[in-house]
Amino acid sequence: MKIVFYGSGNMANAIFTGIVNSKSIEPENIFLTNKSNLEKLEGYHDTLGVSYSYDDEELLKDADYVFLSTKPYDFLKLAERIKPYITKDNKFISIMAGLPISYIRENLQVKNPIARIMPNTNAHVGHSVTGISFSTNFGPNSKQEVLTLIEAFGTALEVKEDHLHQVTAITGSGPAFLYHVFEQYVNAGTKLGIEQSQVEESIKELIIGTGKMIERSDLKMDQLRKNITSKGGTTQAGLNALSNHDIEAVFLDCLNAAVKRSVELAEAEED
Ligand SMILES: NC(=O)C1=CN([C@@H]2O[C@H](COP(=O)(O)OP(=O)(O)OC[C@H]3O[C@@H](n4cnc5c(N)ncnc54)[C@H](O)[C@@H]3O)[C@@H](O)[C@H]2O)C=CC1
Ligand SMILES: O=C(O)[C@@H]1CCC=N1
């Protein structure tokens, strides 16, 4: 199988690094390209063994899957770049937030199968949650091939295309929202008088350990929380203070804003 990445930025890097680490595809069968940063492509070649090129005809000639991984606003230029060289065997996988399959098809001017995925940067470590929606002409074997490819860097969740907006908010942008919360936790921790580096190191370990508990324990999160909370103890005191704030409402605002932006991006392109 030959895979090509048009766009080798943060998200594509997480995906191809995840695929290489999974050893499901020979690294030299993964081809990278970008706008113009040759040094970056050489770096990925040196560290991961992947191939790279700016020759679009060569890249697309026998490509099975072509990732469209530029920013949404760079897609029209990308479409102009690749249109002359698309072959009937190329199947497209778009990671671009908000751009509908119909819009991608219209601008590539082809009837080739197109899948839209919404991954997240946890693909780097094989833990992306990836929402996926297929065009109706995606055959069952190719669908299975794409799902297997996605499972090389995490888990796949097939959803109606409209629901990719919610997936984008909850898990696509999700790591950024959690990093933001963790940053605030570190900032607050450093105000308690302990050395900053000690707070940073211990909270990093706290987050990793808590993630592993969620992964490995049979207990649900509320029970894990209850197991730490002694009656009249320190945890109860902290949780009481937290419950003075409507944290669910804060996150609902956050997620609604991200969904709204995803819908806006889609509607802007349909105009
Ligand atoms: N960063 C993230 O956490 C996530 C990003 N996405 C989506 O992934 C896409 C890429 O985002 P990032 O990787 O963060 O962006 P980035 O800015 O890191 O990378 C963009 C890449 O596109 C390339 N590019 C631009 N114009 C090009 C052209 N004409 N031909 C070939 N390559 C071209 C750039 O050289 C660069 O390699 C976006 O559409 C975004 O919506 C989706 C899920 C999560
Ligand atoms: O911020 C963005 O638009 C992209 C989509 C999900 C994560 N990053």
Image (cartoon, rainbow, N blue to C red):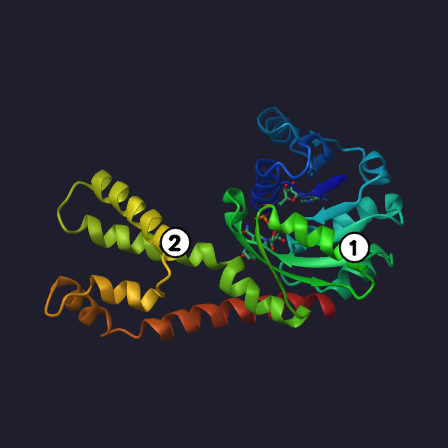
Tell me which amino acid carries mark 2. Arg
Where on the picture, by quarter, is residue 41? top right
The outermost residue toward the top is: 46
- Is residue 69 visible in the rendered image? The answer is no
Q: Is mark 1 within 8 Å of ligand 1?
A: no
Residue drawn at point x = 34 percent, y = 65 percent: 221
- Residue 163 placement (x, y as % from top left): 61, 71
The vertical placement of 17 against 207, above or below, is above
Give the residue at the far front of this rendering.
Answer: 218
Q: Is residue 31 above or below residue 137?
A: above
Q: Residue at x 81, y 37 (%)?
A: 56
Name the residue at 23% across, 38% down. Answer: 197
Q: Amino acid at mark 1?
A: Asn
Going by the image, does 252 lie left or right of 78? left
Q: Nearer the viewer, residue 90 or 70?
A: 90
Q: Is residue 242 at all visible to an observer of this figure?
A: yes
Q: Residue at x 76, y 39 (%)?
A: 2
Residue 141, numbered label: 1
Which numbered disc covers residue 216? Answer: 2
